[in-house]
Image (cartoon, rainbow, N blue to C red):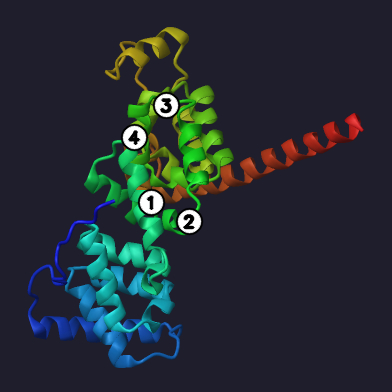
Amino acid sequence: MQVSSFGSRLYAKQVPDLYVEAQTDVIWTELSNKNQLPDTDVQNCREIIKLLLSFNYHKNHIVRELSENTDLLKFPVNRWKETISKLQSYGFRGPHFLPLLAGCHMLLHGTVWNNLQEVLIFLRSLHIPFRKSHQVIAINPALLMSDDMKPIMQKYSNLLKVFTKNEAQTVIVKNPVLLTDPVTETNEIINYVYNEMGIRSQEISRSQVFMHSRAHVITRHRLAERAGMYKMPDRHEIEAKEKSLETIVGTANPSLSDLVDTTNHDFVHSFCSMTVAEYQAFAAMMKEELHEETEDDDADSDLSDSDSE
C-alpha cells in the first residue's frame, strides 16, 4: 500500500500561548489530584498536554483519556510527535490521534504499523471510503492489536450471512466493534432484533445497535413494548418494510436507531412517561431479570447434557 505524505506539521492551528499554559495548568492539576499518575517527568507530561491541546481536544477529554491510560505519560513527547506525524502520513487527522493512542499504546512503541497497513487494505477491499476507514480504526483501535487478519475476516464473513455487501459496509462504518467483538455476541443481537422485534437487515444496518450491549437493546425494546409504543410487526408489514424503509401504514413503531441509539433522556421523553431515574430503575430490574433468564438457560443446558450421558 502506497502511503501518501502529508508532511510533519503537527499543529492544527495556532492557539494563544497564554491560553495553552492556563489550560495545561488546569489539566495537570486535575490529573495530579487523581493520585493515579506513575513516576514521570512533569515537564514531559505538560508538553504532552500542550500537544493535545494544539489539536483542540477539550480539557475534559484529555483528563479522561490520560487518567484512564496513565502509561501514555511515560512516553517522551518526541515519541508522541513522531507517532502523530506518521499517523498523519497515513491520512489520520486531529480528532483521531488521542482515541488511537489511548486505545492502542503499541502505536507509541512503534510495533503495529504493519497491522495498521493491513487493516487499511482490508477496509479498502470492502469499498469503505478512505476517511471512513480512518474513522473505523479510530473508534476501534483494537483492530490493530493482532497481526493475524483471519479473525477479522471471519467476523466479516459472518456478517454476510445476514447482510448484503453494501449493508455490511454500512453496518461496519456505524459499528466498528463488529470486526473484533465475539461472533456469538453479534449473533445474539441479530437474532433478538430479527426474531423478537421483527426488524430486518436494511434497518439494522442503519443503526448503531452493535455498539450497545444485548441487555441495553432488550431493555429499550421491552420498555417500549410494555408502554404500547412498539408492536411486533406481522409478516406483511415485515415484507413491505424490506422493500422500502418508509413508514408502513398501520404500524407506528419507532426505528431501531430511535430505540437504541438515543440518550436515556431522549428515549424516555419520546417513548414513555417516566423520568430518567425511573428508567434507570427499570433497566436495573431488567438486568436482574436477564441474569435470571441466563441462569435458567444454563441450568437447562446442564440437565440436557447430563441426560445425554
Residue 190 disc label: none
Quarter assignment of residue 17: bottom left
> Around disc 4, counting alpha carbons within 10 Å, would you say few (fewer than 14), some (14 to 19), or many (20 or more)?
many
Residue for point 33% across, 32% down: 206
Q: Label 4 belongs to which residue?
A: 169
Mark 2, mark 4: which one is toward the viewer?
2
Mark 1, mark 3: which one is toward the viewer?
1
Mark 4, mark 1: which one is toward the viewer?
1
Residue type, label 2:
Asp
> Around disc 1, counting alpha carbons within 10 Å, would you say few (fewer than 14), some (14 to 19), or many (20 or more)?
some
Percent position of residue 7, x then y: 14, 67
Residue for point 39% across, 90% down: 40
Please give left or right for residue 195 compared with residue 127 in the image: right
Asked whether the residues under the numbered discs 1 and 2 touch, taking CB atoms below 8 Å apart as contact, a structural biologist would say yes
Percent position of residue 119, x then y: 38, 50
> Around disc 2, counting alpha carbons within 10 Å, would you say few (fewer than 14), some (14 to 19), or many (20 or more)?
some
Residue type, label 4:
Gln
Furthest residue in direction right, as rendered? 309
Dot 2: element: loop
> Rounded to the nearest whole Å, what is the CA distance between mark 2 and mark 4?
22 Å
Q: Is residue 158 above or below residue 70?
A: above
Percent position of residue 120, x then y: 33, 49
* Mark with earlier residue (1, 3): 1
* Mark with earlier residue (2, 3): 2
